[in-house]
């Protein structure tokens, strides 16, 4: 039997497929241990679907909840397992798709000759159930089933069994049986199933909230139980060893690859050994400080980050954690992540300011606000022969698109449909020759959105990736429904434009906003600005056994067409960012319609425009904007060299009643990360030396609060 491989499948399985790295050890579990029984509430993707499942606490692990594999699987997929007890603690488990696995509770070992079908939901491989695909569709390749195994004995994680069932730590099941659309997590000894596009939950929001913080510190006010502290550490070791994607930039990357997480902490330096002690501490505040200090060793630009609940707790809790924090100067091999983060944020901030100034010179400008009437989710402007499209994340309304493709719902109005609209409008405008895609304030998002955009502008139909520790490049191919008519057909093949495309990047451009310029450069599309900020792995949120949340680079690494890493960022064709005397960055040559038009002409060897726009630095602009309902569209009518006045008529959506306001041009809608948090993060690079990890995490979180485990 052959199987289909998807990007998500490769990511989930790349570190599980056996390469002979593990040797099964004999670690007999206390199968006859006494235990007490209880009930654990399973929140099955909704508060409306609550199921009480049986839970055990064994006498040698009295604070670690165990549940049946069959109960977890039933909640996770809505399907049932077949479990048959064999001799000597061996169980044969058959999943609905037909794959069979063997679980040996004496060796704490699980294996399958067809590991992909065994640990992934059946719908992933069912060709008749592709109802999670919308405007992009992966072309899945077929391959023979692969053997895979998981050895938990190395991590001192016990599997238990009885006559007809296998009992696992609930947290371990959540870490093994997961898929991007179906994930489990334990929070305060309740089980939540998250990740499904229609789920009411996600891991980050479930774990990282003040209510959970309050319960956590009350629960452990007398200390963390030793059995839970050790199990929590062992489970974290197992998860990092089996999912970490090795983007390549951390100090002890090679040691981590060779020895695993525990080996790295134990051998790398006195600093890492100190962190290990803190992670095993029975003091909850010292433990939280240990999690925070991990960021000095795992910072990779933002895909990997360890949170601690005290950071959103009371002032007293923050101070208690701060007592245990040590200076990075005392941690050998530490990378001062918050300085790197502040520098990156500063790049985004100054790019944004330059873009705002440029928009004031535009002939037309529009910026539809989000449904919550806050920030625009894209900005579109035209000046002369150049159209300009800016957005801050590769995000789309997935439930709305599923409803459109499979339930005859309305065409969603979001980034995808509006990008298509702006492209087609620019192409139909005889004056417009060039189309800029601005990633200067973009931190990434969904790979599907990126694939759609690249397919639309350049007929791109594949990306290159490597998986796990295997650096052999693989090609993942996909189709794009360019015209969004719910069909992948010849109409998509014939969709073409006469536009020249160019992409702006800054050091703030990360993840998908790093992959897009890589794909563009490989395709001969012009890049402008400065080197992008890197970020080469997929990322997702995970939870520790005691409910702390962390993000982790995992599974797959995206590469250029030659299979080389893109984690160090992509150099532009035209590096135009300058430094001011105070150390701040000057993006005025990047965000300048006249310069952009000339760069297009130079790069694509076409004639420069007859009437280029005047340089931004020579223009002073004021503006009157009239605001009513619907999408904001600004039309500039008159401009002069020194004293420039601009008349604009505008309609803005999100208001419940007709209003008319007059505002200065500086109040035109600003982009994505134009928040107090971003401004503060930028200012950190120039006027403040921050200390204390909790403060750093708060600034970081303000900037990245909208990211949810995507690229």
Image (cartoon, rainbow, N blue to C red):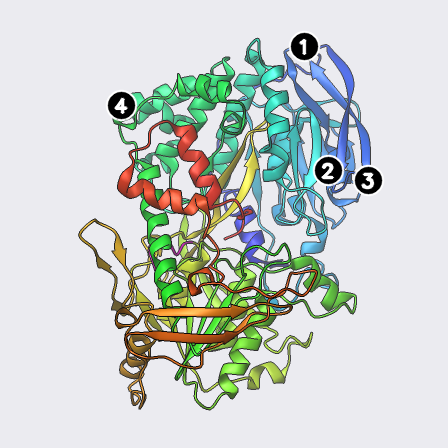
Res 489 → quadrant: bottom right
Q: Main secondary structure of the magenta part?
A: loop
Q: Which mark is residue 48?
A: 3
SS type, badge 1? loop
SS type, badge 3? loop
Question: Is 336 positioned to the left or the right of 467 in the image?
Answer: left
Q: Are marks 4 and 3 in contact (CB under 8 Å)?
A: no
Is residue 319 or residue 468 the one in the foreground? 319
Q: Are marks 1 and 4 in contact (CB under 8 Å)?
A: no
Write down the residue under mark 2: 93
Q: Are marks 1 and 2 in contact (CB under 8 Å)?
A: no
Q: Which mark is residue 656?
A: none
Mark 3 vs mark 2: give the one in front.
3
Question: Which residue sits at x=60%, y=32%?
Answer: 209
Residue 64 placed where, x, y %?
A: 64, 19
Write down the residue under mark 4: 330
Write down the residue under mark 1: 59
Alpha-carbon span between mark 3 and mark 1: 34 Å
Disc on the earlier residue, 2 or 4? 2
Res 183 → quadrant: top right
Q: Residues within 10 Å of mark 3 (few under 14, many from 20)?
A: few
Disc on the earlier residue, 1 or 2? 1
Alpha-carbon span between mark 2 and mark 4: 50 Å
Q: Relative to 65, does residue 339 appear above or below in the rendering? A: below
Q: Relative to 116, does residue 481 appear above or below in the rendering? A: below
Disc on the earlier residue, 3 or 1? 3
Residue 446 placed where, x, y %?
A: 54, 57
Res 513 → quadrant: bottom left
Is residue 440 or residue 267 the one in the foreground? 440
């Amino acid at each position: 039997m052959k199987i289909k491989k998807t990007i998500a499948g490769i990511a989930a399985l790349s570190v599980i497929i056996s390469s002979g790295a593990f040797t099964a050890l004999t670690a007999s579990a206390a199968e006859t241990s006494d235990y007490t029984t209880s009930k654990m509430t399973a929140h099955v993707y909704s508060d409306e679907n609550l199921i009480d499942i049986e839970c055990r606490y064994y006498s040698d692990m009295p604070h670690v909840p165990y549940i049946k594999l069959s109960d977890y699987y039933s909640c996770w997929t809505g399907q049932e397992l077949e479990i048959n007890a064999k001799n000597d603690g061996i169980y044969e488990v058959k999943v609905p798709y037909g794959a069979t696995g063997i679980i040996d509770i004496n060796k704490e070992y699980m294996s399958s000759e067809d590991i992909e079908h065994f640990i992934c939901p059946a719908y992933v491989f069912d060709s008749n159930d592709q109802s999670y695909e919308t405007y992009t569709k992966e072309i899945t390749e077929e391959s023979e089933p692969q053997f895979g195994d998981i050895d938990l004995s190395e991590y001192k994680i016990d599997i238990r069994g009885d006559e007809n069932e296998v009992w696992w730590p609930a947290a371990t099941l959540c870490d093994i049986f997961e898929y991007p659309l179906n994930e489990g997590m334990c929070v305060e000894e309740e089980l939540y199933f998250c990740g499904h596009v229609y789920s009411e939950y996600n891991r980050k929001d479930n774990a990282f909230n003040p209510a959970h913080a309050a319960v956590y510190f009350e629960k452990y006010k007398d200390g963390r139980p030793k059995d839970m502290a050790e199990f929590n550490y062992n489970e974290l070791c197992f998860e990092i060893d089996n999912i970490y994607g090795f983007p390549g930039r951390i100090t002890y990357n090679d040691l981590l690859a060779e020895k695993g997480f525990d080996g790295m902490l134990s051998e790398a330096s006195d600093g890492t050994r100190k962190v290990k002690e803190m992670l095993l501490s029975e003091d909850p505040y010292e433990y939280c400080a240990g999690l925070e200090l991990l960021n000095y060793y795992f910072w990779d630009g933002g895909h990997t980050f360890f949170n601690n609940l005290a950071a959103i707790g009371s002032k007293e809790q923050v101070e208690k954690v701060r007592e245990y924090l040590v200076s990075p100067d005392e941690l050998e091999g530490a990378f001062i992540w918050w300085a790197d983060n502040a520098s990156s944020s500063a790049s985004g901030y100054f790019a944004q300011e330059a873009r705002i100034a440029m928009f004031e010179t535009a002939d037309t400008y529009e910026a539809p606000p989000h449904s919550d009437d806050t920030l625009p989710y894209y900005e579109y402007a035209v000046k002369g022969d150049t159209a300009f499209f800016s957005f801050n994340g590769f995000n789309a309304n997935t439930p709305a698109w599923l409803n459109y493709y499979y339930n005859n719902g309305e065409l969603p109005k979001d980034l995808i449909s509006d990008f298509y609209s702006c492209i087609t409008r620019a192409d139909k405008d005889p004056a417009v020759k060039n189309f800029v895609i601005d990633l200067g304030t973009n931190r990434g998002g969904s790979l599907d959105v990126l694939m759609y955009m690249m397919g639309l502008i350049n007929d791109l139909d594949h990306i290159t990736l490597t998986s796990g520790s295997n650096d052999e490049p693989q090609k993942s191919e996909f189709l794009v429904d360019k015209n969004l008519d719910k069909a992948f057909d010849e109409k998509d093949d014939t969709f073409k434009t006469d536009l020249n495309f160019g992409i702006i990047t800054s050091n703030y451009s990360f993840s998908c906003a790093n992959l897009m310029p890589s794909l563009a450069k490989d395709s001969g599309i012009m890049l402008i600005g400065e080197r992008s900020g890197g970020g080469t792995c997929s990322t997702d949120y995970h939870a520790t056994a005691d409910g702390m949340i962390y993000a982790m680079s995992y599974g797959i690494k995206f590469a250029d067409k030659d299979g080389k890493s893109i984690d160090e960022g992509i150099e532009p064709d035209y590096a135009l960012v300058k430094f001011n005397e105070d150390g701040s960055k000057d993006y005025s040559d990047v965000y300048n319609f006249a310069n952009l038009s000339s760069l297009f002409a130079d790069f694509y060897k076409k004639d420069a425009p007859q009437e280029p726009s005047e340089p931004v630095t020579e223009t002073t602009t004021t503006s009157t904007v009239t605001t009513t309902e619907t999408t904001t569209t600004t039309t500039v009518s008159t401009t002069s060299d020194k004293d420039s006045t601009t008349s604009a008529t505008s309609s803005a959506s999100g208001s419940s009643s007709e209003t008319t306001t007059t505002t200065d041009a500086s109040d035109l809608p600003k982009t994505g990360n134009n928040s107090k948090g971003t401004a503060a993060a930028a200012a950190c690079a120039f006027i403040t030396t921050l200390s204390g990890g909790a403060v750093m995490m708060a600034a970081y979180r303000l900037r990245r609060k909208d990211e949810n485990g995507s690229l």
